[in-house]
Amino acid sequence: MHLFHIVGTIVIGIVGYFVARRAGIPAPAMIGSMLAVGLVSAFTGFAEMPAPIKMASQGISGAFIGLSVGRRDVRNIPHMIKPLLLLLTLLTLNTLLLGFAFHTLFGWDLMTGLLSCVAGGITDVSLIAMDMDADASTVAIMQTIRLFFVLAVLPSWIGFMTRNTDAAPAASKPLDMSPGSSPTPLDRLLTTPRRKTAFTLVIALSCGVAGYMSGVPAGALVFSLVAVAALNITTDVVTMPIDIKRIAQILAGSLVGSSVTPDTIAHLGSIVGPLICMIVMYMAVNALFSIVASRTGMLDMKSALFASSPGGASDMALIAADFGADLTKIGVMQIARAAYAAAIMPQVALLCVRLWG
């Protein structure tokens, strides 16, 4: 690899991020860098990124998912187990059905088809796709359009689905919001934000290396996710500034973008059919889950619609606040979905590919 090309690719990714942020594009660090580097890669072949970037990006990405899992979320899972099991079952069946349909009807390789439909984060799933020899650029495009669609259509869709319901959600048992446990020795050792950030980075990157060397599919992300989540549940010593996440997303977006070729651009038209199928199926899952959850008393309709929407947890929370939905329950559901998508679904996809082929 040429150092000049690597540095140039990162600069292009940074420019793409700033342009996307200025344009108000969701997840600008990932999407902006991916689009900018992808275009340069497709038309010039200039873009290059070293393989270790993938491992580091996966480690940091896993850490941020782990940081979203707190003590309160774990304590509240037993109260949310029924809707959680229903949602994860529906999302898993949806992924399997669509993945096999894309493979059979549209000629996609099975791993690409399955990962394109996983309801996870764009960065996480795209990095996993690279790790599992799927077509990462196709997966990233499908995941990006899914996010755009959810953010663009969700408010109107929820307004339509709740048009005949009461303005206020039905009363339900509140979740446990009590404070966490007493400080641990590690808490007393790491007392400043700088120390906590450094410690978290060391854990994320070292677990990323261990996961990568283990041979576990998406091991760098999974190992980091599990380690940081365990520390976040038991201590208060893990934290990372949002700027580190943006850096990791820019690197990940540049990495995915550098895999784009002229053939990728030429075959963009072939994803229209799968995209329509994916969107229709996600809307069906969202409606089915919400109807069942509301009629059985597991969640009110508004909260169920937000909890089962395949967008980012923070995006869903921001929109849900305007609708008067139960933000705590939505947060627990969305965090569990993201962790499940990153840690479990890659293993499910690999099992399906091995059994099928």
Image (cartoon, rainbow, N blue to C red):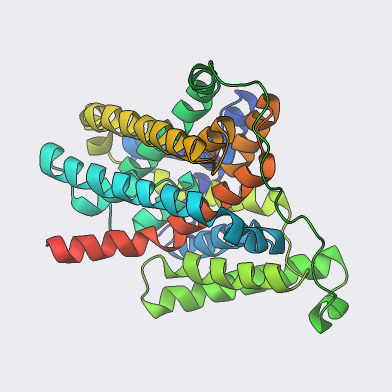
Picture layout, residue 296 above or below residue 245: above
Q: Quadrant of the C terminus?
A: bottom left
Is residue 168 shown to the viewer in this render? yes
Picture layout, residue 206 above or below residue 246: below
Q: Viewer-proximal residue, 352 or 223?
A: 352
314 lies left or right of 48: right
Q: Quadrant of the N terminus?
A: bottom left
Q: Determine the residue located farthest toward the bottom in the rendered image.
A: 185
- Residue at image x 67%, y 40%? 327
Q: Viewer-proximal residue, 75 or 112?
A: 75
- Residue at image x 46%, y 58%? 340
* Residue 120 place in picture, x, y as percent: 46, 48
* Residue 121 place in picture, x, y as percent: 49, 47
Q: Which of the 4 image quarters holds residue 104?
A: top left
Is residue 258 shown to the viewer in this render? no
* Residue 307 place in picture, x, y as percent: 54, 40
Q: How many marks?
A: 0
316 lies left or right of 129: right
Q: Viewer-proximal residue, 339 or 328?
A: 328
Picture layout, residue 86 above or below residue 193: above
* Residue 14 place in picture, x, y as percent: 59, 41
184 lies left or right of 49: right
Picture layout, residue 155 above or below residue 234: above
